[in-house]
Image (cartoon, rainbow, N blue to C red):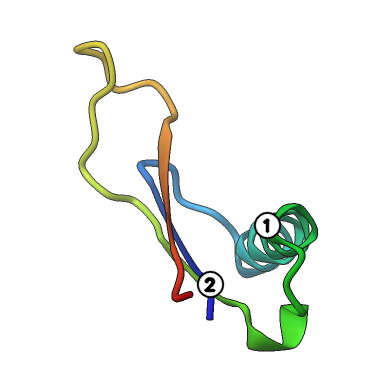
Amino acid sequence: MPFLSVRTNKPLAPEQARNVLANASAVVCKVLGKNEQYMMSAIDQSQAMLFGANDQPAAFAELKGLG
């Protein structure tokens, strides 16, 4: 079961968060050749996050899988 975890320092409206997860899930499953029925994804918003010592909008994605 693939699991995609996305963390971002930007707050998202519920519909935006759902769209990010739906699009990311579809891409991951296509690349991995997995059925999206078994894909799990989550998003954590408004995280304290710096990239390159600045706090501009950023995201970190982590993909884990079994098998």
Which of the 4 quarters of the picture holds residue 64? bottom left
For badge 1, the amino acid type reads Val
Please tell me whether residue 12 is drawn above or below residue 36 in the rendered image: above
For badge 2, the amino acid type reads Pro
Residue 54, numbered label: none
- For disc 1, the neighbor class at 10 Å (few under 14, some 14 to 19, many from 20) is some
- For disc 2, the neighbor class at 10 Å (few under 14, some 14 to 19, many from 20) is some
Verify CB contact (< 8 Å) between mark 1 and mark 2.
yes
Query: Relative to the observer, which residue lies in front, 43 or 3?
Result: 3
Residue at (61%, 69%) from the top-left corner? 14
Which of the 4 quarters of the picture holds residue 33? bottom right
Residue at (24%, 35%) from the top-left corner? 49
Question: Distance of mark 1 from mark 2, alpha carbons?
Answer: 8 Å
Residue at (64%, 86%) from the top-left corner? 38
Residue 2, numbered label: 2
Query: Relative to the observer, which residue lies in front, 52 or 67?
Result: 67
Q: Is residue 3 left or right of residue 46?
A: right
Q: Residue furthest front?
A: 67
| Residue 19: percent from left, percent from top | 73, 61
Q: Is residue 19 left or right of residue 57?
A: right
Query: Relative to the observer, which residue lies in front, 44 or 11?
Result: 44
Q: Is residue 12 left or right of residue 53?
A: right
| Residue 8: percent from left, percent from top | 40, 45
Q: Secondary structure at mark 2?
A: loop
Q: Secondary structure at mark 1?
A: helix
Residue 28, numbered label: 1
